Image (spheres, coloured by chain):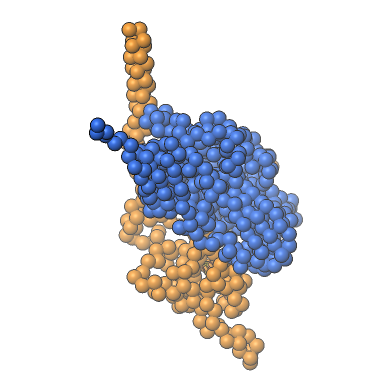
C-alpha cells in the first residue's frame, strides 16, 4: 500500500514538474504577444542593403584598360573582355565588355582587383528574369544604376541591424533617416582635444 | 496447432535524400524490425561538387569564394581555414587587429551555426516554434556580417594576411548591442526547451556514445565534448589570439543527445562573452576611433603600425603556394575542420584535402541508431549536426 502511495506521489510530482516547465515555455510564447513582428513585408517594405553589399556589378566603359585582371581573379573567369590592339597608339582598345549574371556569384573579386576601379558593386539584388540569357549584361546594361530603395515612393525602407542607432535592435521601430551608431572620427577628435585642453 | 506469427519480416526502407528533416540530401537505408532499427546505412554523394579537385586549378584568391559553400552555415570557418593553410605555409604574418576581427567573425559565425542547429534539432524532434525564434537572432548576426563583409552568407571576407576590409563605422557598437541582447535570448530558448518534459523524454539517454568510443571514432567538436572530453582546438592549437581571451571549454559528461545540446547552448554563451572581450581588447578599438587617432597623429603615428592594420599586405592575384605540405585545422562549430595542403611553388595548390567535421562525425550514426526506434533516427541525426555541403564537398 505504501509503495503504491509513494508511486502516486512520484507521479503527481512528475506531473506538477511537467506542468511547471510547460507553463514556463508557454510564458515565453505568450510574451510574444507584446512584441512587434520583425518580419519585413517584402514588396512593400524593403531592407536597405548595406554599403558594402555586393549586388549587380556596375562597369564604366571609359575607365577600363582591358588588362583582364578581373578575368584572372574571377573564380570562373567570367567577364568577357573583347579588345583589339591598336598598333597606331600602341594601346588596347576595348570593344565590348560583358558579365553574365546568371553565372556570377557576386564574390567581388573582380571589383577588388580592378586596377582602375572601372568595376563597382551596386545594391541591386532582384535580378530575376524569365529567360536566363537576359542576365548576360553588356557594357551598356552594366553601366545602368539601380533605383534606390530610399527613393522609391512605393516602398518603406527599413535599415538592417548594423545601421541602427545604438541601443535599437529592430529596424521597424526607428526612422531610417535617424543617425546610425558610432561617432564620426572628426567628432572623436574634437572630443579628445577637449579632453586634453581641459 | 495454429501459431500466430508475431515476428514480422525485416523491412528495408529508404529515408531521403529529399526527406524534409534530412539535413541536406542524405539518404539512409534503414533496416527495420517493426519499429526497431536493426541497421542503417548512410548514402552520401548527392551534393558532391568536387571541391578538392576544383582547388587544384584555382589560385587561393579564386578559390576563396567557393569555400563558403562547404559548410554554408558556419561560413567564416571555411574561409578561415582556406587562408590559414597557405598563410602558415608561406609564413605570412597576420596583424593583431586583423586577428581580433577574425576572432569576432569566427565566434559570431559559431553562434549562428549553433543557433540554426538548435532550430533544426528541436524541429526534428517535433517542436517547430524555436526554429522561428532562432532565426530572429541569426538574422541579426547576418545583418552584422552583411555590413562588414557585403554578403550575408557568402562573405569572401578573409584574405591571406588579414581580412578584406576593416569594420565599418558603428559596427563595434552594434555588435556589442547584439551581444547584450543575445544573452537573455539564450535564456529564453532554455526556458522554452531545456526543461520541457517532452523534449527531455525524447533526448535523454538517446544516442549515447562513451568517452573511449568517441575518441576511437575520431569524433570532434560538440560530439566529442559532449562525451566528457575537454578537447577544443582553440585551446589546444593556440591559433589566432584565443589565448588572450578569458574563456573555458564547454563540455559535458552525458554523451547523449541532451549532453550535446547542453554543450552547444553553453558554447553560444561562451562565444558571446568572447566576442564582447574581443570588442574591448581589439587594438585600436572601433574603426572610427582608429581613424580619429590616425588623423590626429598624422602619417607617422604609431596607429599606422603593423598591429593596427586589418591586413599585412594585400595578396597579389599571383600569390604562390610555396612547396611543402602541412595540415592546418580550426575548431569549427561542428568539429575539427582541417585542410591538408601540398604546394609546389605554383599559384595552384597541388593537393587540397579537406577534413570536414561533419563527414567524420556522420560515420558514427549507424552505431548510434542501432537498436533505437525509427523516430529516434531524426533526433540522433539532428544532434550529430551535419551539413551535407561539407560532408560531400
Ligand atoms: S580589371 Fe578593370 S580595367 Fe582591367 S579589364 Fe577588368 S574591368 Fe577593365
Ligand atoms: S563578382 Fe566574382 S564571379 Fe562575378 S564576375 Fe566578379 S569575380 Fe567573377
Please report the residue visible at 59 percent of the width from the left and 79 percent of the height from the top: A66
Can you tell which chain is drawn blue?
A: B
Establish if B156 lies above or below A166.
below
Give the x, y percent position of residue A48: 43, 56
How many labels, in total? 0
Establish if B277 lies above or below A2.
below
With B374 as the anchor, is B312 left or right in this view?
A: right
Please report the residue visible at 51 percent of the width from the left and 61 percent of the height from the top: B49
Quarter of the image where the N terminus of chain B is located? top left
Quarter occupied by residue B250: top right
Please report the residue visible at 61 percent of the width from the left and 87 percent of the height from the top: A85
Q: For residue B90, say whether it is visible.
A: yes
The residue nearer to you, when weighing B213 against B384, is B213
Give the x, y percent position of residue A70: 58, 72
Establish if B92 lies above or below A161.
below
Give the x, y percent position of residue B197: 38, 28
Ligand 1 is found in the corner quadrant, namely: bottom right
Establish if B325 lies above or below B173.
below
Q: Going by the picture, which residue comes out furthest to the left?
A: B2
Q: For residue B190, say whether it is visible.
A: no
Give the x, y percent position of residue B347: 67, 67
Can you tell which chain is drawn orange?
A: A
The residue nearer to you, when weighing B146 against B207, is B207
Amino acid at each position: 500500500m505504501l509503495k503504491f502511495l509513494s508511486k502516486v506521489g512520484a507521479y503527481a510530482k512528475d506531473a506538477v514538474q511537467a506542468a511547471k516547465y510547460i507553463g514556463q515555455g508557454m510564458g515565453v510564447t505568450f510574451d510574444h504577444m507584446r512584441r512587434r513582428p520583425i518580419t519585413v513585408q517584402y514588396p512593400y517594405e524593403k531592407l536597405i542593403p548595406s554599403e558594402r553589399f555586393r549586388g549587380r556589378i556596375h562597369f564604366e566603359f571609359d575607365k577600363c584598360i582591358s588588362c583582364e585582371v578581373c578575368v584572372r581573379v574571377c573564380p570562373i573567369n567570367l567577364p568577357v573582355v573583347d579588345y583589339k590592339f591598336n598598333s597606331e597608339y600602341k594601346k588596347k582598345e576595348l570593344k565590348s565588355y560583358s558579365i553574365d549574371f546568371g553565372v556570377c556569384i557576386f564574390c567581388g573579386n573582380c571589383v577588388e582587383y580592378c586596377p582602375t576601379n572601372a568595376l563597382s558593386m551596386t545594391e541591386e539584388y532582384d535580378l530575376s528574369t524569365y529567360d536566363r540569357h537576359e542576365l548576360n549584361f553588356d557594357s551598356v546594361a552594366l553601366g545602368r544604376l539601380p533605383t534606390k530603395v530610399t527613393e522609391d515612393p512605393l516602398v518603406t525602407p527599413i535599415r538592417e541591424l548594423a545601421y541602427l542607432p545604438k541601443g535599437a535592435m529592430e529596424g521597424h521601430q526607428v526612422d531610417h533617416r535617424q543617425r546610425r551608431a558610432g561617432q564620426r572620427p572628426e567628432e572623436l577628435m574634437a572630443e579628445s582635444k577637449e579632453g586634453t585642453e581641459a | 496447432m495454429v501459431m500466430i506469427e508475431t515476428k514480422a519480416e525485416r523491412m528495408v526502407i529508404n529515408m531521403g535524400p529529399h526527406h524534409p528533416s534530412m539535413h541536406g540530401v542524405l539518404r539512409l537505408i534503414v533496416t527495420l524490425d517493426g519499429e526497431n532499427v536493426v541497421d542503417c546505412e548512410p548514402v552520401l554523394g548527392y551534393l558532391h561538387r568536387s571541391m578538392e579537385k576544383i582547388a587544384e586549378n584555382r589560385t587561393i584568391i579564386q578559390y576563396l569564394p567557393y569555400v563558403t559553400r562547404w559548410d554554408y552555415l558556419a561560413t567564416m570557418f571555411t574561409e578561415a581555414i582556406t587562408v590559414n593553410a597557405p598563410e602558415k605555409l608561406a609564413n605570412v604574418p597576420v596583424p593583431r587587429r586583423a586577428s581580433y576581427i577574425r576572432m569576432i567573425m569566427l565566434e559570431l559565425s559559431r553562434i549562428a551555426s549553433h543557433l540554426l542547429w538548435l532550430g533544426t534539432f528541436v524541429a526534428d524532434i517535433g517542436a517547430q516554434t524555436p526554429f522561428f525564434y532562432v532565426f530572429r537572432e541569426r538574422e541579426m548576426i547576418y545583418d552584422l556580417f552583411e555590413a562588414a563583409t557585403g554578403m550575408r552568407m557568402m562573405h569572401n571576407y578573409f584574405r591571406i594576411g588579414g581580412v578584406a576590409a576593416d569594420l565599418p563605422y558603428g559596427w563595434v557598437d552594434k555588435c556589442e548591442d547584439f551581444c547584450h541582447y543575445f544573452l537573455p535570448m539564450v535564456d529564453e530558448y532554455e526556458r522554452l526547451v531545456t526543461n520541457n518534459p517532452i523534449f527531455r523524454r525524447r533526448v535523454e539517454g538517446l544516442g549515447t556514445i562513451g568517452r573511449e568510443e568517441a575518441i576511437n571514432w575520431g569524433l570532434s567538436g560538440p560530439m566529442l565534448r559532449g562525451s566528457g572530453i575537454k578537447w577544443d582546438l582553440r585551446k589546444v592549437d593556440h591559433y589566432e589570439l584565443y589565448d588572450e581571451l578569458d574563456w573555458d571549454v564547454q563540455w559535458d559528461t552525458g554523451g547523449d543527445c541532451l549532453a550535446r545540446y547542453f554543450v552547444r547552448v553553453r558554447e553560444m554563451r561562451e562565444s558571446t562573452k568572447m566576442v564582447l572581450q574581443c570588442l574591448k581588447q581589439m587594438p585600436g578599438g572601433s574603426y572610427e576611433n582608429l581613424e580619429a587617432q590616425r588623423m590626429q597623429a598624422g602619417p607617422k603615428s604609431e596607429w599606422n603600425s603593423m598591429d593596427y592594420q586589418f591586413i599585412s599586405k594585400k595578396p597579389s592575384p599571383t600569390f604562390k603556394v610555396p612547396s611543402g605540405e602541412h595540415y592546418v585545422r580550426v575548431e569549427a562549430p561542428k568539429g575539427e575542420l582541417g585542410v591538408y595542403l601540398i604546394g609546389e611553388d605554383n599559384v595552384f595548390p597541388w593537393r587540397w584535402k579537406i577534413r570536414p567535421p561533419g563527414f567524420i562525425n556522420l560515420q558514427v550514426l549507424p552505431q548510434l541508431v542501432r537498436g533505437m526506434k525509427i523516430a529516434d533516427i531524426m533526433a540522433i541525426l539532428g544532434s550529430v549536426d551535419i551539413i551535407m555541403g561539407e560532408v560531400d564537398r
